[in-house]
Image: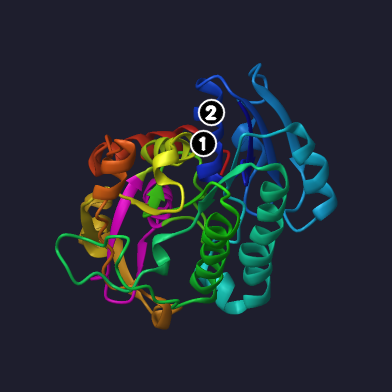
Amino acid sequence: MNVLVTGGAGFIGRWVVKRLLEDGHQVWVLDDLSNGRRENIADLESHPGFRAFVHGDIKDEGTLEELFRNQFSICYHLGASINVQDSIDDPRTAFNNDTVGTFYVLEQCRKHNVKMVFMSTCMVYDRCTDEKGITEEHPIKPASPYAGAKIAGENMVLSYYFAYGLPTVVIRPFNTYGPFQKTGGEGGVVAVFLKRKLSGETLNIYGDGTQTRDLLYVEDCARFVVQAGYSDAVNGHIVNAGLGRDISINDLALMIVQDPKSIQHVEHIHPQSEIQKLLCNYEKATRLLGWKPEVTLEEGIRRTEEWIASTNLI
């Protein structure tokens, strides 16, 4: 198939592109490099199935019209603003990228009858209150403009399924980590902690550290994302993916450094948008896609640390 990946030079996007190429598809990548890095896909661009990297913006309708002449079968829409604090500081950019930009991509999918897989986020959910985990029917709570813009995007994506019969699916991966994730302030907690450990720095925990996260290894996530595009069973659905195990940030820090003296608690930068407990119930993904995670948290952390230690890219 001909496939478009928006945000394909980003952390998760890079692994989605790799998976699609391995599955034998022709892949185009659209990315404005505001979050992504060209280096993320440098080793993939020589693959015979890699057709083009387009440095462009999902809000540029001319760029999209030109791209969609390639008769795509699927559009994996991962291009987005992704940082909660950035969305609080600058809600306009988050809304324009995550809601308006999604609308522009959707319009091209409708015009050319291209399936859209929309990458949403677990950050749309209210805190978990059930040890069975968060299902897709769990209450949502837009605790940040990022979450609000993603919910708006989700609703537009699903509206095109119901109004036009366009095949669309909303996917909500939980906190994803692994090689190629940024290790600076805008990176995920695992990457940030590992980088600080390897640099001999103290691990800083926002707030009291009792907040929990369900951490999904990136190759498991990419497999889920790609599979959602292949299957008609999930069209018109919202589908979660996670490890099905949560861990407190305090316990995660200890798992990584094994030394309480190397950990300190600092004032939370956005306590109003913190979600105290995130735990994924991925039964629907198993039922509809046959998907389940394969990489344990311990193994995923080991692989990620090995990658960070081996590269000066980030």
Mark 2 residue type? Leu
Is residue 200 in view from this perspective? no
| Residue 123 visible within the image | yes
| C-beta proximity under 8 Å, tags 1 and 2 | yes
In depth, the one of 177 and 63 nearer the eye is 63
x then y, percent, for residue 54: 76, 39
Residue at point 39%, 76% (across, down): 141
Q: Amino acid at mark 1?
A: Val
| Residue at the left extreme of this rendering | 131
**Above or below 63: residue 102:** below
Q: In terms of depth relative to the viewer, which is nearer, 64 or 272? A: 64
* 251 on left or right of 76: left
The residue tagged with tag 2: helix, strand or loop? Answer: helix
Q: Nearer the viewer, residue 48 or 309?
A: 48
- State the separation of the CA atoms marked 1 and 2: 6 Å
Which residue does the image show at 41% across and 53% down from the upper left? Answer: 237
Residue found at the very far top of the displayed protein: 48
Figure quadrant of the C terminus: top right
Residue bearing the label numbered 2: 20
Colour setup of the view = rainbow
Q: Which one is in front, 58 or 113?
A: 113
60 is higher (above) or lower (below) than 116: below
- Residue matched to label 1: 16
| Residues shaded magenta | 189-216
Is 164 magenta? The answer is: no
Q: Residue at x 32, y 60 (%)?
A: 136
- Label 1: how many Cα within 10 Å (few below 14, some 14–19, many 20+): many
Give the answer, above or below, for where 135 lies relative to 228. Answer: below
Q: Is residue 8 left or right of residue 111?
A: left
Report crowding for label 2: few under 14, some 14 to 19, many 20 or more residues within 10 A (C-alpha).
many
Which quarter of the rendering shows the N terminus? top right
Q: Give the image location of residue 294, x and y in percent.
A: 27, 34
